[in-house]
């Protein structure tokens, strides 16, 4: 049974803080994704990774960076958090050649 | 790039009735169209998908139809039950298993 876990369900940070969101999958999936989910906007892709140390920008990468040092772990970094980054963040993984993206439960981040 | 529009944004139906959610896409090169269901407090989960070489696919009470010429696809849920209440997202992709572009989501409420 595929499991994608995210480090926190709820997180409150102050403007200007550096924020790390961690995602771990236990199924040896090659591809991992970070999305943010906002009401009325659906899920928007921030960054994705096809392999260790590889990353590609998604549709809304501004203000974010990522790190993938190990295959099972994909981190999203907010270098200097801003209030417009208050959102639900979802991590997903998929194995190459497969169809279904497996999502974690999400981290609701509030930046005050 | 790809743009996916989803309607309606909210849908209320009586238990036992049918529900239909519609999506349109802009990129004629898209060839994979999944539907995800997100229950409260959880990440989205794949419920059904269709590839561009197929016009319709059914799985018990759920069906998806695809019109490539018009570039739209729809989710049909028959005999709705209270446990069908959730947020539903359509998505499109150029490549099976690759990054997805999601619609804005539909909140489905099934009233008992």
Image (spheres, grey):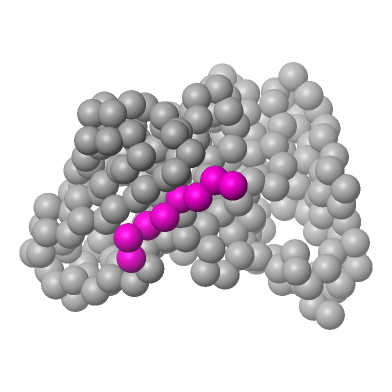
Q: Residue A93, image x and y in percent?
A: 45, 40
What is the magenta segment's predominant secondary structure?
loop
Q: Is residue A19 visible?
A: yes
Farthest residue to the bottom: give it: B112
Residue A53 located left or right of residue B69: left
**In the image, B109: left or right of A31?**
right
Residue in the picture at 50% in, 24% down: A96
Image quarter of residue B56: top right
Quarter of the image holding residue B37? bottom right
Q: Position of residue B74 (x, y in %)?
A: 74, 43
| Residue drawn at point x = 40 percent, y = 49 percent | A91
Q: Confirm whether residue A57 shows in the render.
A: no
Q: Which quadrant of the figure contains the C terminus of chain A?
A: bottom left
Location of residue A71 with respect to B107 vertically, above or below: above
The quarter of the displayed image where residue B38 is located? bottom right
Left or right, B74 with respect to A16, comes to: right
Q: Is residue A33 above or below residue A81?
A: above
Residue A25 falls left or right of residue B85: left
User: Is B64 placed above or below B41 here?
Assistant: above
Kindly identify the residue that appears in the image at 82 percent across and 49 percent down: B62
The picture places residue A24, in percent across and down from the top left corner, at 37, 48
Magenta highlight range: A1-8
């Amino acid at each position: 049974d595929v499991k994608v876990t995210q480090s926190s369900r709820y997180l409150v940070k102050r403007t200007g803080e550096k924020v790390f969101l961690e995602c771990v999958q236990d199924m040896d999936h090659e591809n991992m994704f970070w999305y943010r989910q906002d009401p009325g906007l659906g899920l928007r892709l921030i960054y994705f990774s096809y392999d260790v140390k590889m990353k590609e920008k998604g549709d809304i990468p501004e203000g974010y960076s990522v790190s993938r040092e190990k295959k099972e772990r994909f981190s999203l970094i907010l270098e200097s958090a801003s209030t417009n980054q208050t959102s639900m963040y979802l991590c997903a993984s998929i194995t190459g050649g497969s169809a279904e993206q497996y999502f974690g439960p999400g981290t609701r981040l509030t930046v005050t | 790039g790809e743009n996916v529009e989803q309607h309606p944004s909210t849908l209320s139906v009586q238990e036992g009735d049918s529900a239909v959610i519609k999506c349109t896409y802009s990129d004629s090169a898209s060839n994979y169209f999944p539907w995800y269901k997100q229950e409260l407090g959880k990440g989205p989960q794949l419920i059904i998908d269709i590839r561009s070489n197929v016009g319709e696919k059914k799985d018990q009470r759920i069906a998806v139809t695809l019109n490539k010429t018009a570039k739209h696809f729809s989710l049909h849920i028959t005999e709705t039950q209270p446990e069908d209440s959730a947020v539903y997202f359509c998505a499109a992709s150029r490549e099976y298993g690759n990054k997805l572009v999601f619609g804005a989501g539909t909140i489905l409420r099934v009233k008992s």
